[in-house]
Image (cartoon, grey):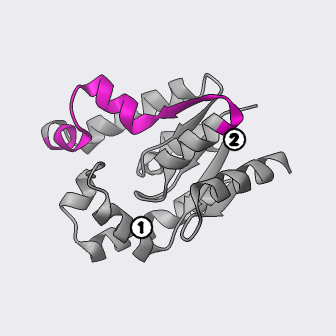
Amino acid sequence: MESIVLIGFMGAGKTTISKELAATLNTRVVDMDDVLVERIGQPISDYFEEHGEPSFREHETNLLKEALNEESVIATGGGVILQKENQKVLSDKLVVYLKADANILVQRIREDKVNVRPLAIKNDDGDLKRLFFSREKLYEKLAKITVDTSEKLPEEIVNEIIQQVAS
């Protein structure tokens, strides 16, 4: 099995689905945000503020390339698709776009007190939706498989991914 790369906006379910999918497939999971927090030694929001987004994106690109060397389910950060280099790296990989309605994404982001996202702190709901719409075409372009997570349980999403990968 090749690595399965989950992409999508904040709140789409990448972390949750990656864990369930990896457990179901009996493979390892790489949650890029978790690994990056460990490596940079601070929350992403703090790193963004101290060192800027370009520096963070460089760490993210290096980790993506590294993670793809081993068979795994990879949960990317929502902005991983913004870098041209990452788009090139992902172009021939098994990329699954976890898509959700913009209103549902914003609701999930606002209700999630565990994962406080840097871009959610400084942007209002309208800004978050505009950000989502500005990235949507890139997610769609890179995806080999698209699964709508808006109204589905994690098990349903995992089953749908497995069925589509198998076909």
Front position in the image: 111 or 120: 111
Residue at figure coordinates x 62%, y 36% from the top left: 22
Residue at figure coordinates x 39%, y 29% from the top left: 35
Residue segment shown in magenta: 24-49
144 sits left or right of 8 in the view: right
Q: In the image, is residue 78 above or below residue 88?
A: below
**Residue 25 belongs to the span the image colors magenta:** yes
Residue 126 image label: none
Q: In the image, is residue 43 above or below residue 14?
A: above
Q: Which residue is mark 2?
A: 92
Element on which disc 1 rests = helix
Compare marks 1 and 2 and give the one earlier in the sequence.
2
**Residue 47 belongs to the span the image colors magenta:** yes
Q: Position of residue 28 (x, y in %)?
A: 59, 27
Element on which disc 2 rests = loop
Q: Amino acid at mark 1?
A: Leu
Mark 1: give few (<14), some (14-19) or many (20+) Cα within 10 Å: many
Q: Position of residue 107 (x, y in %)?
A: 35, 70
Q: Which residue is mark 1?
A: 105
